Amino acid sequence: MHMADALISPAVGAVLWTATAGTIACCARKVRQNLDERKVPLMGVLGAFVFAAQMINFTIPGTGSSGHLGGGLLLAVLLGPHAAFLTIASVLVVQALFFADGGLLALGCNIFNLGFFPAFIAYPLVYRAIAPAGSSQGRRTAASLAAAVAGLQLGAFSVVLETVVSGISALPFSSFVLLMQPIHLAIGIVEGLVTAAVVGFMAKAHPEIIGAAPRSVRGDVGFRQVVVSLLAVATIIAGVVSWCASGKPDGLEWAIASVAGKGELKSPTDGVHGGLATLQNKIAFFPEYSFPKPAGQGAKEAAALRDAPAEGEGRLGTSVSGIVGGGLTLAVAFLIGFLLRRRVAS
Amino acid sequence: MAHIETALRDLNRLDLLAGGDSAIHRLDPRAKVLVTLVYIVSVVSFGRYEVSGLIPFAIFPLVMVAVSGLPPGIVVRKLLVVLPFAALVGLFNPLFDREPLLSFGSLAVSGGWVSFVSIILRAALTVGGAVVLVAVTGFAGVCRALQRFGVPRAFVVQLLFLYRYIFVLGDEGIRMSRARELRSFAGRGMGLRAYGSLLGSLLLRTWDRAERIHMAMLSRGFQGEFHARRESSFGRREMAFTAGWCFLFMLLRFVNVPRLIGVLVTGVFR
């Protein structure tokens, strides 16, 4: 579920970075105020624990595939929302920097998707509602399942929103949603079961750990906070949707332009071929593109091939010059690197 | 698991590389973090069908690798790990976007394939930039830069803590996993029940370790801050480095150099 830099636009990246930075600042303040100092190393080591836990797999019965812990919900259960959010964020920073799991610009999105929902929605609103402190293992299992599924569904949905609004991937909204939500339903169930198993073990072996976290947490998550976090989500969704609305015409315009044959290919030829060639190009472009009827396409193509050598040459020219130029630039870049290397070495 | 194990080994190597001593290594981390962010934002800000304009941006990782004396292999290997994922996601574009956009004679290339190439290029450039940043700065350096940029200290301390214990607990996780695999026959004990207890005992050990660490730190006078060996300041060199790269990125962002060269070259031969 980690998003990569290649698929998001700077606007989306910046908004989510801002939201995440704000949440981190707020959590950092809360953690300093509320938590006893002993939790400082605990948070760090538990973050490392998530890495370690991801190295151990288990087989999912009946499928032959294997799964592992994601960790967001477990951290929230063990540490409470604020400390858990910081820990998840730190895990994602390390993954982005060293494992190239998700990019630097996408870091805001990833921390938000994988940290905010489990820590501030799934844990306080779902898990604690179903299994208040001192519940039975059955209730804890149900709570873990519900909370993990809720957290991952929300996270997956916001991945879809962010990707679609960015507009780099051509995946339509509906098919992307249909792709993501069922997959993350399955992942959520696995995550919920694993979290329940670990929490159950801890409750048996070290009841005070599971019992201790809720007490320190319970006071934090008041009504006001829930309202504020819901408001934040609503604002962000509203912002994202409004972007979507203003972003659409661009895509539409582009589609119209390409159907009408006034793509971006035309402009570079202007300088080289001069006005005459442009005129010829334009005249030659229109017959082929202005009849987007599926019927008679073969005949049209044959006609285009037969009687439009000039137009073909023009477009061939731009494409080739693009590739030649690209290749040369890359070669120059490598050459510069190579020369610098030799200078440094000598 | 094999993936994470190699990733952990790579992490170790990257960390060792960051201890190097070149002109780039000696720069203040803030300059490097800033330049990398500007770089990534300018790469990502191109439209979805841009291919030629992205190519010149390869200059940044290439020059950084060259000047800092990094082995190029480590960057290439990272790219090989990441690019298949980018390709997997990008592969939807040719399926959904079949509008012809380019053509070579009678061969038409759809917009989907152009944007697919664009996604691959973006992924390679952004990942390359990030790997180079870490390899010449090191995690501690990046954290120091973050703190100077105003990231809350609690979060920076959390990052440094996490980083220190990844290696310790990562090894422990790998050992536990291997021990279970060696003792498991016909897949017994690989299911969820044993997994829960396994993780639970790892968690217990982690918890105890955290308490020991805390006591050890207190007895050594920890007051909420890690101290760095290499102190640096944002001087004239850093200024020049940042301004130079940012200027180049802006230039490359607004002037399509490959297209100019291509038009010139093909124009000469016509």
Image (cartoon, helix red, strand yellow):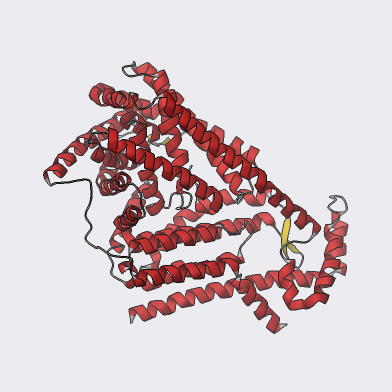
- Which residue corresponds to the image point at 32% horizontal and 19% vertical from the top-left? A133
Closest to the observer, B223 or A121:
B223
From the viewer's perspective, tell me whether residue A68 is left or right of residue B202.
right
Task: Specify the quadrant of the image occupied by residue A192.
Answer: top left
Task: Specify the quadrant of the image occupied by residue B252.
Answer: bottom right
Closest to the observer, B172 or B21:
B21
- Quarter of the image with the C terminus of chain B is bottom right
Q: Is residue B69 visible?
A: no
Q: Is residue A132 visible?
A: yes
- Which residue corresponds to the image point at 59% horizontal and 67% vertical from the top-left? B254
Please determine whether, in this image, residue A82 is positioned above or below residue B10: above
- Quarter of the image with the N terminus of chain B is top left
Q: Position of residue B230 (x, y in %)?
A: 24, 63
Please determine whether, in this image, residue B46 is positioned above or below residue A8: below
Q: Position of residue A48 (x, y in %)?
A: 30, 42
Q: Position of residue A79 (x, y in %)?
A: 31, 32
- Numbered circles on residues, count: 0
Q: Position of residue B154 (x, y in %)?
A: 30, 44
